Image (tube, rainbow, N blue to C red):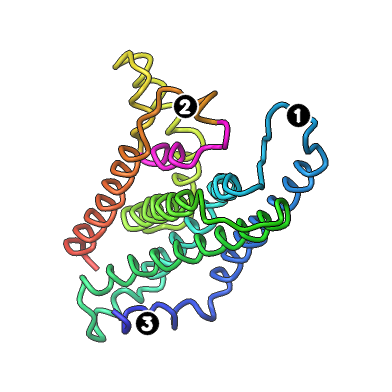
């Protein structure tokens, strides 16, 4: 495992896009939270509802929700890292040099897990900093939303991974990644719920929406997700999709022509 991690590190440590997309996530997370923090601090006690609560324990949910809007950056990074292997034929060279097909795709899965750990770490760090600034204290209560953020990161990153493995081209995979996440999933879910199943629950079980509902805005469950499944069910659905993405990616790379 360490050998595979080291191999991936050698591939990305001088890769400019890796640092750019990771930097955009880190800067975006801090920047958006700083603006929201200033907004919430200026209106403290003047509104009947806190749009962006930064006091413990709710700060964890606020940071995790804002982070969810930035997960397209690590997703795009995953697409670039995998599609570059196909573009420059380095996946063939890795197999020729002694890696098995299993090891090659496992290295990408490990890379995705490490990127998710990094995004979750920065999420936690921002929560501690802004929470301490706002309330002058520290608490671990509400930390489950940082864990949910990790699961959500894996959902986005591995969804991007399977698109890259299936399509091989970064431009096409990124286009599908964005369009599906921002438009098509809502469209498909709405059609299934309103036209085919005549329900209001199917949408919550869709690949990215399940993880999004797992980390809603702080007042989301009262206004938008009143009939959403429990966190335990959503967590199980997310884990199912993560395992499915990994399984299909492994089987696809095992059987396809290099």
- Cα separation, mark 1 vs mark 2, equals 22 Å
Query: Residue at left 35%, top 14%?
Result: 195
Q: Which residue is mark 1?
A: 47
Locate residue 122: give its quadrant: bottom right
Q: Position of residue 44 (x, y in %)?
A: 78, 38
Asked if residue 219 can be seen in this view, the reply is yes
In screen coordinates, is 199 left or right of 68? left
Asked whether the beta carbons under mark 2 and mark 3 sit within 8 Å of each other, the answer is no
Q: Which residue is mark 3?
A: 7
Please report whichever mark, 1 or 2, sits nearer to the chain's N-terminal start. Answer: 1
Query: Residue at left 33%, top 16%?
Result: 199
Asked whether the beta carbons under mark 1 and mark 2 sit within 8 Å of each other, the answer is no
Q: In which quadrant will I find the C terminus?
A: bottom left
In screen coordinates, is 211 left or right of 55? left
> Tag count in the figure?
3
Q: Residues within 10 Å of mark 3 (few under 14, many from 20)?
A: some
Q: Nearer the viewer, mark 2 or mark 3?
A: 2
Q: Secondary structure at mark 3?
A: helix
Q: Which residue is mark 2?
A: 225
Please report whichever mark, 1 or 3, sits nearer to the chain's N-terminal start. Answer: 3
Reply above or below: 105 against 131: below
Residue extent of the magenta highlight: 207-219
Asked if residue 172 can be seen in this view, the reply is no
In screen coordinates, is 11 left or right of 95? right
Q: Position of residue 19 (x, y in %)?
A: 58, 71
Query: Residue at left 30%, top 37%?
Result: 233
Q: Position of residue 166 (x, y in %)?
A: 31, 53
């Amino acid at each position: 495992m360490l050998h595979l991690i080291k191999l991936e590190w050698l591939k990305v440590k001088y890769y400019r896009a890796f640092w750019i997309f990771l930097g955009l996530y880190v800067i975006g997370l801090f920047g958006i939270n700083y603006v929201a923090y200033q907004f919430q601090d200026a209106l403290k006690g003047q509104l009947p509802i806190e749009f962006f609560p930064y006091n413990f324990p709710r700060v964890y949910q606020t940071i995790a929700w804002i982070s969810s809007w930035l997960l397209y950056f690590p997703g795009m990074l995953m697409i670039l890292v995998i599609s570059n292997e196909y573009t420059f034929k380095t996946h063939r060279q890795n197999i020729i040099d002694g890696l098995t097909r299993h090891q090659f795709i496992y290295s990408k899965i490990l890379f995705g897990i490490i990127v998710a750990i990094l995004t979750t770490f920065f999420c936690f760090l921002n929560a501690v900093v802004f929470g301490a600034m706002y309330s002058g204290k520290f608490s671990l209560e509400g930390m489950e939303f940082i864990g949910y953020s990790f699961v959500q990161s894996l959902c986005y990153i591995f969804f991007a991974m399977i698109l890259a493995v299936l399509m091989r081209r970064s431009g096409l995979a990124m286009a599908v990644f964005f369009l599906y996440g921002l438009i098509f999933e809502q469209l498909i879910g709405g059609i299934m719920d309103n036209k085919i199943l005549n329900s209001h629950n199917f949408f919550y079980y869709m690949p990215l929406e399940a993880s999004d509902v797992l980390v809603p805005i702080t007042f989301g469950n009262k206004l938008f997700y009143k009939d959403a499944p429990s966190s335990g069910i959503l967590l199980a659905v997310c884990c199912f999709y993560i395992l499915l993405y990994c399984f299909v990616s492994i089987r696809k790379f095992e059987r396809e022509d290099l």
